[in-house]
Amino acid sequence: MEKFFKLKENGTDTRTELLAGLTTFMTMAYILAVNPNILGAAGMDKGAVFTATALASALASFCMAFFANLPFVLSAGMGLNAYFAYTVVLGMGYSWQVALAAVFTEGLIFIILSLTSVREAIFNAIPATLKTAVSVGIGLFICIVGLKNAHIVVGEASTLVTVFSFSGSVADGTFRSEGITVLLALIGILVTGYLLIRGVRGNIILGIFITWGLGILCQLLGLYVPDPDAGFYSLIPTAVFSAPQSMAPTFMKMSLSGVRVMDFVVVICAFLFVDMFDTIGTLIGCASRADMLDKDGKLRGIRGALLADAVGTVVGAIFGTSTITTFVESSSGIAQGGRTGLTSVTSGILFLLALFFSPVFLAIPSFATAPALVLVGFMMMQQVSKIEWNSMLDAIPAFICICAMPFMSSISEGISFGIISWVVLHAACGKAKEVTPLMAVLAVLFVLKYLLI
């Protein structure tokens, strides 16, 4: 492993990489439960989607390790799976087989773009200030994802979001299950923060297990009462072993039956845009957090990383799942010291094991992983000190990029607004010479995207 993954050269060791892989997997294992439910709404077989998601995630993560030797883990992208199910299938009226064909086509296009260095050129064209802003924005984005997952932050009509009301969760003098999970998540944030401050090795994964363990204790004491209809499931695994479910209902089911050409092109473009810039944004953010970018803001192995993402998408469509993309939760493993492909391999192996131990992995509650996301968000937020705030020409686009990600719930939207504002302000302030042709093209394409798609 030392020879293949170059552990010492990257300032890491086997134990650190294994722990990082476990941490990343634990923070993103929820996708194995969420993705089948979302794609199930489109009429797909949930058991087959579970198997397809696990296998495609493992294979794509292995590709990341072997193509690029980087600690990023991949799976079915959130947002892209919702677009697949609720917009393309339920909204536009296409069958899920046609949606899989669009994902498959998108993946093939990405393979070509990756091999021809187009995606690599886009990555390298983004200014250093915006790359730092992307890292900070992702930190805020995954922090609010964690807060929402734990229901600490909830929707509210007049203010869009607000803090969870403990008083409203009391029934007959006792807390409802939701109140208990929110309280456990808050305790988990403090526990994980304490472990982080004390420099305890494996602080994030320990925080997850401690929070989950407290939840199990609450269930045994009757404080937490499972209610599947309300979304509160048992925190205690019903079994340990489970045979993998067949992938036959979704395997190789792509179809172009009844496709309207222009609508199909729009669908592919939407998948292309979100996948490309979510991936680029995640790679930038996580690599910045780990100081893996060189002095020119470039990432070693970037072409292989983007190719792994593209291959994962193609394989995912063949198996029967939505777009496979690099997960922002990879930052949790990087925060634990993951620096090489051994982290990705570890997570990939755990995805394979999940096929046989699904009851255990599916019992991990979102309130237990939420503290990890919040604290990783804190660590990524530290990059904000690298932004030259005295240079308003660079700082304002960076600020726009940072704000757009959490408020619009999208990494790609943050990059879009950041690049558009950077190009427009530089041109308006007489600094057009600093705008590279590729940045100008990207800005125009983003504007057209908002007008046409």
Image: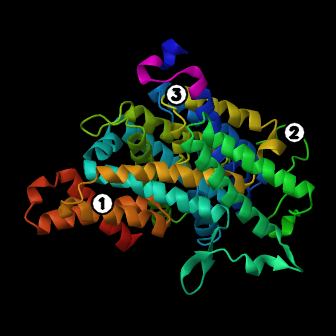
**Figure label count:** 3
Looking at the rendered structure, the kind of residue marked 2 is Ser
Q: Residue furthest bottom?
A: 158
Residue labelled with disc 3: 341
**Residue 432 x %, y %:** 10, 60
Looking at the rendered structure, the kind of residue marked 1 is Ala
Residue labelled with disc 2: 242
**Chain-order first, disc 1 or disc 3:** 3
**Residue 278 x %, y %:** 45, 53
Measured Cα–Cα span from mark 1 to mark 3:
30 Å
* Local SS, label 2: loop
Please tell me which residue is depicted at 16% across the width and 55% down the height of the picture: 435
**Which mark's residue is nearer the viewer, 3 or 2?**
3
Front residue of 42 and 255 = 42
Q: Residue furthest top?
A: 3
**Chain-order first, disc 1 or disc 2:** 2
Please tell me which residue is depicted at 62% across the width and 28% down the height of the picture: 18
Instruction: State whether residue 358 is above or below residue 89.
Output: above
Magenta-highlighted residues: 8-16
Measured Cα–Cα span from mark 1 to mark 2:
48 Å
